[in-house]
C-alpha cells in the first residue's frame, strides 16, 4: 500500500515523464490524479513482463547463470521502477564489471549518475529552499536530459548484457 501511494522519485524516468506531461498537456490534465497508481501498475507490469520473457528464454535454452541473470534482473528493475535509489547502483555496477561489459560505458553510466545526483541537489535547493516552482526550475531541462541519458545508457548496457549472455551460451 505504501509503494502504491508513493509518487515516483525525482530522478526516475517516470517523474520526468510526469513533468513532461505538465509541459505538454498543462497542470489540469484529467489523468493527473491517477498518475501515481497508474505508474505503479504500469511499471510493475513492464517489469514482470520483461522478467517472464527473460526467464522463459533462459528456460527454453536450459541454461541459468546466477551472475548474468541477477544482473539482468537488477538492471530491468532499475529501468522500470518508479523509485530509482542510488543504492541500487551499488548493487548493479560491480555486477556489470564482473560480467565483463565495456568499462567505458560503465564509467559513463556512473558519470551520468553523478550528474543526476548533482541536479537532484540543485532541485532540492531551488524548489524547497528558494521556493521556485518545478517548471521554472532553471536546471529542469538539464536534469531531465541527465535522467533520460542515464536510462538510455542503462538500456544499452542491459542490451549488451543480453547480447553477451546469448553469445556466452
Image: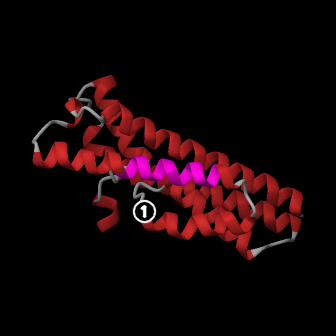
In the image: residue 93, left or right of residue 29? right
| Residue occupying the point 87% across, 62% down | 168
Residue 149 percent coordinates (x, y): 52, 40
Q: Is residue 145 visible?
A: yes
| Residue occupying the point 73% across, 76% down | 66
Q: Residues within 10 Å of mark 1 (few under 14, many from 20)?
A: few
The main secondary structure of the magenta stretch is helix
**Nearest the eye: 64 or 103:** 103
**Nearest the eye: 95 or 135:** 95
**Nearest the eye: 153 or 110:** 110
Q: Is residue 45 visible?
A: no
| Residue occupying the point 85% across, 71% down | 63
Which segment is the magenta one? 105-117
Q: Quadrant of the C terminus?
A: bottom right
- Relative to residue 61, is residue 38 depicted above or below? above
Residue 21 percent coordinates (x, y): 34, 31
- Relative to residue 79, is residue 149 depicted above or below? above
Q: Which residue is mark 1?
A: 86
Residue 161 percent coordinates (x, y): 73, 56
| Residue occupying the point 56% across, 57% down | 47
**Is-magenta flag for residue 137?**
no
**Is-magenta flag for residue 112?**
yes
Q: Quadrant of the N terminus?
A: bottom left
In the image: residue 28, left or right of residue 159? left
Element type at mark 1: helix
Residue 77 percent coordinates (x, y): 54, 60
Amino acid at each position: 500500500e505504501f509503494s502504491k501511494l508513493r509518487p515516483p522519485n525525482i530522478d526516475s524516468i517516470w517523474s520526468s515523464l510526469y513533468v513532461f506531461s505538465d509541459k505538454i498537456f498543462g497542470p489540469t490534465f484529467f489523468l493527473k490524479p491517477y498518475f501515481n497508481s497508474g505508474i505503479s501498475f504500469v511499471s510493475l507490469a513492464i517489469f514482470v513482463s520483461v522478467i517472464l520473457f527473460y526467464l522463459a528464454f533462459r528456460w527454453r535454452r536450459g541454461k541459468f547463470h546466477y551472475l548474468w541473470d541477477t544482473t539482468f534482473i537488477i538492471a530491468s528493475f532499475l529501468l522500470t521502477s518508479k523509485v530509482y535509489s542510488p543504492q541500487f547502483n551499488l548493487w548493479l555496477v560491480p555486477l556489470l564489471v564482473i560480467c565483463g561489459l565495456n568499462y567505458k560505458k560503465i564509467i559513463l553510466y556512473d558519470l551520468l549518475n553523478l550528474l543526476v545526483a548533482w541536479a537532484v541537489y540543485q532541485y532540492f535547493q531551488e524548489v524547497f529552499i528558494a521556493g521556485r516552482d518545478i517548471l521554472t526550475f532553471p536546471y529542469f531541462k538539464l536534469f531531465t536530459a541527465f535522467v533520460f541519458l542515464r536510462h538510455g545508457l542503462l538500456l544499452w548496457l542491459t542490451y549488451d548484457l543480453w547480447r553477451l549472455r546469448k553469445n556466452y551460451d
